[in-house]
Image (cartoon, grey):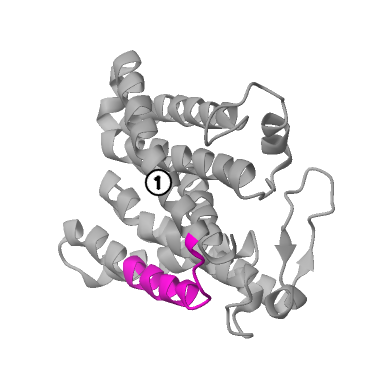
Amino acid sequence: MTGGAAAVTSLGSLPLVPAGTTLPPLAYLLGVVFAAAAVTVSFRRRSPAITGMHVLALAPWMALGAAAHVLFVVDGLPALLAPLGGSPTVYLTTATLAGGVWLTASAAIADPKRVPQALAAVGTLGVVAALVAVGAQGVPGAGARWAGLSVAIAVPFALIAWSVLAAVRPAVASIRRVGQLVVFGHALDGISTAVGVTQLGFGERSPLSRIILELGVPSMPVLGEAWLFVLVKLAVSGGVVSLFAPTVREAPREGFLLVAFVAAVGLGPAVHNLLLFSVSA
């Protein structure tokens, strides 16, 4: 890989570090860390409202970070931006941009209920632009079909998982929409990972996930032996939603931020998988 990869330092060979982990040049790293710290301090000082709608409004930003990383992988980012596209820098960069837009919208918009709409709109514009750039790299038919099939399988899996969770833990109804986002994101991540490993020959970057994928359980259609990984993802995401539901009720700001983070680590990698399939499978 050239371009973006040449501008970063790989850390993937270190023990327990996911493959593909990189650090940008020091100037970029310091800039991102400073910007993230500034946004964090501003958040604490201004204390803007944080509701379930704000968490849902962050979904396009989660997809934006994933799309930017795919562009980095395929050398689709401009040279000036390429160092920011590596993992995990791209996710910190995207979170910082989202936080900046959130703070700006909170200061500029009189009606607090319209802030999530503005946050979602800007994120959507960003992800559309990123998707156009990804599509410009070329979309092989086979990869796009497997990406679409992953979504089609994930939807009923997520619906069933949520129905079971709601029946077992009725308290999760208080965060229904954000809880469903968490479960769907992790269902899609698990299924897209299973499809990538089983059908497209992709590897899993996380050491812990690789252990689960290599347990040697009986195979099943489409998902192969990786169906166990899907169940683990669903169980963990459901457990986390159940665990955080009381926190959201008692301390909404902290609770919703925690739920947003859990949603991001599911939906972000899932979108990354789907786009990577589409341009490289």
Q: Let me know if residue 255 appears in the view.
A: no
In the displayed structure, 13 sits above or below 23; it is: above
Quadrant in which the C terminus is drawn: bottom right
**10 Å neighbourhood of mark 1: few (<14), some, or many (≥20)?**
many
Q: Which residue appears at 41% of the width and 64% of the height?
A: 98
Q: Is residue 130 magenta?
A: yes
Residue 192's spot in the image, x, y percent? Answer: 52, 45
Residue farthest to the right, as pictured: 14
Residue farthest to the top, as pictured: 168
Residue 259's spot in the image, x, y percent? Answer: 42, 40
Q: Main secondary structure of the magenta part?
A: helix
Looking at the image, residue 4 sits to the left or right of residue 139; the answer is: right
Q: Let me know if residue 12 appears in the view.
A: yes
Looking at the rendering, the stretch of residues picked out in magenta corresponds to 123-141
Quadrant in which the N terminus is drawn: bottom right
In the displayed structure, 151 sits above or below 134; it is: above
Residue farthest to the left, as pictured: 111
Residue 47's spot in the image, x, y percent? Answer: 35, 55
In the displayed structure, 238 sits above or below 134; it is: above
Looking at the image, residue 221 sits to the left or right of residue 33; the answer is: left
Q: Which residue appears at 57% of the width and 43% of the height?
A: 193
User: Image quadrant of residue 86?
Assistant: bottom right
Q: Which residue appears at 27% of the width and 39% of the height?
A: 177
Q: Which residue is mark 1?
A: 151
In the displayed structure, 24 sits above or below 12; it is: below
Looking at the image, residue 134 sits to the left or right of residue 112; the answer is: right
Q: Secondary structure at mark 1?
A: helix
Instruction: State the residue in front, 213 or 122.
Output: 213
Q: Which residue appears at 38% of the width and 26% of the height?
A: 161
User: Image quadrant of residue 24?
Assistant: bottom right
Q: Is residue 90 magenta?
A: no
